[in-house]
Image (cartoon, helix red, strand yellow):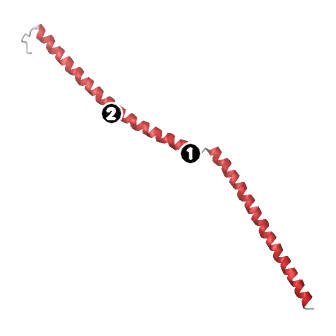
Amino acid sequence: MDGERVPLKEYFERLLHEHDKTHSQLAENVKTALASQDKRLDGMNEFRASLDDATKNSVTRDYYDSQHDALEKRVALGENFRSKIIGGAAVLVVLGGAVGGAIVQIFTK
């Protein structure tokens, strides 16, 4: 302006125009920032949902431990039964051998 005079109306119109321009730019910047923030929040919500799904499909430690203990007991019972079967079979083999030996003794006399 270098010392030149400007009518007051023109001065205020220019100030108002610059003010409106500044606010329009600020509004545009806010709009862009909000869109960017919404995009990030959507990504976070998707991640949170995937974590929720993973949690729903997981077993708790207590449930796992109780089921594992039950399986250990069943395996122990199976091993015990297997040992009894093998022991019984060994007894039958020994008895079969003894009976067979006795029969051979009877017929060879």
Image side of residue 17 versus residue 73, left or right:
left
Taking the spot 69% from the left edge, 51% from the top edge, the residue there is: 69
Neighbours of disc 2 within 10 Å: few (<14), some (14-19), many (20+): few
Most extreme residue toward the bottom, as rendered? 109
- Residue to which mark 1 is pinned: 58
Label 1, label 2: how many angstroms apart (C-alpha)?
33 Å
Q: What secondary structure is found at the residue carrying circle 1? A: loop
Image side of residue 79 versus residue 104, left or right:
left
Taking the spot 13% from the left edge, 11% from the top edge, the residue there is: 11
Q: Is residue 70 above or below residue 100?
A: above
- Residue to which mark 2 is pinned: 36
Image side of residue 43 versus residue 17, left or right:
right
Residue type at mark 1?
Ser
Q: Is residue 103 above or below residue 2?
A: below
Which corner quadrant holds the C terminus? bottom right
Taking the spot 18% from the left edge, 18% from the top edge, the residue there is: 18
Q: How far across and how far down the image is residue 62, in percent?
A: 65, 44
Q: Nearer the viewer, residue 96 or 12?
A: 96
Q: How far across and how far down the image is residue 67, in percent?
A: 66, 49
Which corner quadrant holds the N terminus? top left
Residue type at mark 2?
Ser
- Which quadrant of the view contains residue 55? top right
- Which quadrant of the view contains residue 61? top right
Most extreme residue toward the top, as rendered? 8
